[in-house]
Amino acid sequence: MATTLTSDKDLEDLIACPSCDALYHAAAPGHGERAVCARCHHVLIAPIEGAVLRIVALALTILILLGTAVFVPFLKIEAQGLSHSTSIVDAALSFSQAHMIGLSIVVLALIVFIPLARAMLLIYVLAPLMFHRLPLTGARMAFRWSEELRPWSMAEIFVLGVGVALVKVADLARVELGAAFWMFAALVIVTVLQDGFLCRWSVWKALDARTGKATSE
Amino acid sequence: MPVDAPVLTARKAGLVACTQCAGVWNVGQAKCPRCGAALESRDIHSLSRVWAWWFVGLLCYIPANLFPMLNTTFMMKTSGDTIVGGAVTLISHGAIPVALVILIASVAIPASKFVAVAYLALSVQFRWKTDHLKRMQLYEFVEFIGRWSMIDVFVVAVLSALVQLSVVVSIAPGPAAVTFAMSVVFTMLSARSFDSRLIWDSLDPQPDEDSLT
């Protein structure tokens, strides 16, 4: 567990809670334990055994699911002999038909490009660690960006939005769910699992161990 | 450990902490040598950025509620639905749980987010002594929940892409979709600009004052 410091120690072993600035002496918690900030309860360290392998596997799954979902049928509507089918990209581009091209780009980024970028960045950072190799150039910056992008990756919110939309059209027409719909539903579970395995401190520690901790000098 | 007991912080120890990777460095270091993030013991411009994004977000939220999110053309007749109007229609069709999702995500969350962020910013500005842990949890909750407001924009996207049955019925996005999405993005930026370490600073004596206020 992390303990509060009272005397000066090497900076190397110190961590400060990002939420409240409390200073701790970092030590890997025991098996299945987490280190939590004593005063603000922010989770500081939560390592999971074999996490690197699992995160890379899940990131690959996200790449495949997202990469395919964009190209396969998403939803199809049928009513009174008329039918219309739509893809994920059509959904985002629907705003551009109403002169809201900016919003189309934002929606496309939130549900496709940012989740894709995050998955690629995580693979770039973690795959070499998985094979006990040296991190690739820029791995540190890549990991920082992947964490910065996290709140903007909204595939799971999109899925809930699809659910609400389906209820809205339920008494208007019959809707057929395409493969892309199920892929996005699977994506939600994969993303939640991945974020659960990801412990920032452990990744930074692993990057430091492979390259030697960066020093302020 | 009692929550309000003084704690050795990085700042008191003459160090500066990285909010990205939790690394600790000597004061004066401008960029985190480990992850490259900008280092700032306390982000002094944090509150001005919080308020700037907050006001822009609020400005966008007003038209988002007044103008239609959706324009439905049914048998040649076009009618607009605002956020609340759309939820009322859903209730009249008996889809109460879905109406609740929309009302919570598009009305309750954004509205309470404006209040919560303003309260947090004011509490730091005036060094209020209200429960630090509760304020911290409020902040984490706001950060976690804020992005879910985007759901209504996605509903509009899916509906207007899907419901295109020539003359019978078609749905197109209304002008509120843009302002609502902007409002969600700006309030997310507002909450993310807030330096939560400021909440805990009122536990320590102010650096340029002799006594606690």
Image: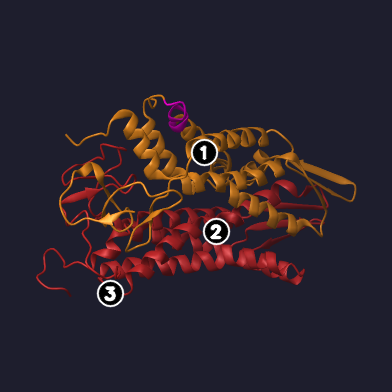
Q: Chain of mark 2?
A: B
- Mark 2 against mark 3, which lies toward the viewer? 3
Image point (58%, 39%), residue name: A112
Chain B, colour shown: red
Q: Which mark is residue B165?
A: none
Taking A137 as reference, is A27 above or below it?
below
Residue B117: quarter of image:
bottom left
Span shown in magenta: A125-132
Q: Are marks 3 and 1 in contact (CB under 8 Å)?
A: no
Disc 1 is placed on an element classified as helix
The CA span between labels 2 and 1 is 27 Å
Chain ID at mark 3: B
Q: Nearer the viewer, residue A86 or A121?
A: A121
Q: Earlier in the sequence, mark 2 or mark 3?
A: 3
Disc 2 designates what residue? B149
User: Which chain is home to disc 1?
Assistant: A
Q: Whole-Å distance between the Cαs marked 3 and 1?
A: 41 Å
Q: Nearer the viewer, mark 3 or mark 1?
A: 1
Quadrant housing residue A87: top right
**Would you call the spot at circle 1 few (<14 residues within 10 Å), some (14-19), or many (20 or more)?**
many
Q: Are marks 2 and 1 on the same chain?
A: no
Numbered tag placed on residue B129 in the rendering? 3
Respond whether the residues carrying marks 3 and 1 are from the same subunit: no
Q: Please tell me whether the stretch drawn in magenta is mainly helix, strand or loop.
A: helix
Instruction: Name the residue nearer the viewer: A204 or A116.
Output: A204
In the drawing, does residue A105 fall left or right of residue A173?
A: left
Give the amino acid type for the residue marked by disc 2 in the picture. Ser
Write down the residue under mark 1.
A55
